[in-house]
Image: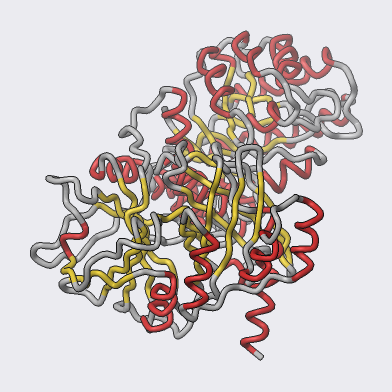
Amino acid sequence: MRTSIATVSLSGSLTEKLTAASRAGFDGVEIFENDLLASPLTPEEIRARCADLGLSIDLYQPMRDIEALPEEEFARALRRARHKFELMGRLGADTVLVCSSVSPHALDDDALAAEQLSRLAGLAEDHGVRVAYEALAWGRHISTYDHAWQVVRSADHPALGTCLDSFHILSRGSDPKGIEDIPGEKIFFLQLADAPLLAMDVLQWSRHYRCFPGQGGFDVAGLVRHVLRAGYRGPLSLEVFNDVFRQSEAGPTAVDARRSLLTLQETVGLAALPAPAPPTGIAFAELVTPDAAPVSAVLGALGFTRTARHRGKPVDLWQHGEARVLVNTGPAERRDGTRLAAVGLESPDPAGAARRAEALLAPVLPRRRAPGDAELEAVAAPDATELFFCATGRSPLPDWRADFEDVAPAPHDGGPWRVDHLSLAQPWHQFDEAALFHRSVLGLRPQESVDVADPYGLLRSRAVSTDDGAVRIALTVGPAPTDDTAHAQHLALATDDVVAAARRYREAGGPLLPIPANYYDDLAARFEFPDGELETYRELGILYDRDAHGTFRHCYTHTVGRVFFELVQRDGGYRGYGAANAPVRLAAQHAVRAFTAG
């Protein structure tokens, strides 16, 4: 099915928006009137530019406050409409969006609205234009799609149809099943947007918080199914008003938008993409650092052993049980630049996972391989983290470990360690994009987004995981573009005895994050512990949480560069990440940072 995007969904000049839409693979655009008015190009030049880019102009919008008006007001509206229809002829657009009126002059008179819309459609027909009438969720008298359709049906003009907008329909809680009663040929256009579920004025909700399908809480796919059953065959078009998108680069936003439509089309059966191949585990986490000594000291204190060295690159493999960490000193970094740069994901089908990623517009990473290097498939996530699809120890598939030569045997003591989860800090403007990417490209299931109180603002966090929890990734973003807390990343290591692991780490000289005594006083009030247990937690800085399924004990190392480690113990099927303790952890990290800086 053809895809389109409203220029209001992207930032920049009109020509920047058109170029971004074309490069992302859209077939057409909706030209938002403000974009045209602000452009130095004539309508004819815009038409030519779109043609050169392979874009059709599917809609010109919006025309406001046009129906159910006193005759004198309507005459002025028709004069305005005539000018717009002439402009559309120059532009090469044949469909105009008319929004239900919010004018204080509008009358609560459906018969008058239908009569005037019919007259408007007659004028439009004379100019080769169709009128798509849309119910704004905050329309003065017409605010639901079924009411708008009743007026269109009463008007009974061939150049008049309806425009369906998922936000206006779903934000009001309307039942979209009734869409199937609208003849498909009378649905002139379909606009799509998702949104987080918020309790707020619908106009403010619409103007600031829309997002692309799959990034919010609406059942956009269900609505599209009803529209398709009605017989609609026009484009799937995105109209998204979003403060973040308006400040972001148009190119990446357009790619994110196109990915959302590809995923939506797959969901409703309009597109066949390579099948998802959800990862089955974490093969490795790769840290890039200008100085291996600090992070190596932390790993050594945690019980990791340097077991192998890459044959051709300055990369060491550290291992503890099933947990593997690569320390890479190759790329040039800032002094404080230790960061989590890459993740190896165990994949049941590495080639298939890469094909799906590429089909969903994930950047495929070119690799400079020396002779004999393993041929690994890799893509880049929105935050530039490199994701490698691995088949560790599964011959005849390429094994990344073949690129390393052993320098020491892997340790066999200290219990069964593995990577419990990763926390990846996202650029402030790519949080929703990251959630959609990890769901659609990697096949991970997103959980609800949560806000975490930081001493200097709020952090947003959203976890994505496999159903069995073998892969868990927490996506986080800070309260502002310049906030340093947004750049922290961490690697959570699972052990069956966090107390013993914390003691060994401390005895090996590793400093644990100190937790305020007030936290443990509150913990004593919230839970009952066996004698001595709470004192142990207080001594080691271990935090505690409990849900309906089990318990969670965890503690933290100090930060090296941008990375810190977390030791975790899950018991009884605990499903969370200790979010209730995050404000205490964040405050403690700020305190340590301030102390070391002073």
582 sits to left or right of 228:
right
Relative to 183, 417 lies left or right: left
Do we see residue 175 in this rendering?
A: yes
Rendered location of residue 542, percent (x, y):
62, 63
Picture quadrant of residue 240: top right
Residue 158, position as x, y percentages in the image: 60, 13
Residue at 55% from the left image edge and 46% from the top image edge:
571
Q: Residue at x 20, y 50 (%)?
A: 393
* Relative depth, front residue between 385 and 470: 470
Q: Residue furthest bottom?
A: 598
Q: Name the side, left or right, on which 522 lies relative to 317.
A: right
The one of 410 and 366 positioned closer to us in this rendering:
410
* 159 in relation to 347, above or below: above
Q: Relative to 131, does residue 543 appear above or below in the rendering?
A: below
Snapshot quadrant of residue 534:
bottom right
Residue 545 appears at what percent x and percent y?
Answer: 66, 51
Q: Which color scheme does this rendered protein use? A: secondary structure
Q: 59 or 92, which lies in front? A: 59
Q: State the count of labels.
A: 0
Residue 103 % position (x, y): 86, 34
At a point 36% along the width and 43% down the height, the residue shown is 279
Q: Quadrant of the C terminus?
A: bottom right
Quadrant in the picture for the N terminus:
top left
Q: Residue at x 19, y 45 (%)?
A: 394
Viewer can see residue 61 = no
When the figure is inspected, residue 83 is found, relative to residue 315, above or below; the finding is above
Going by the picture, which residue comes out furthest to the front? Answer: 531
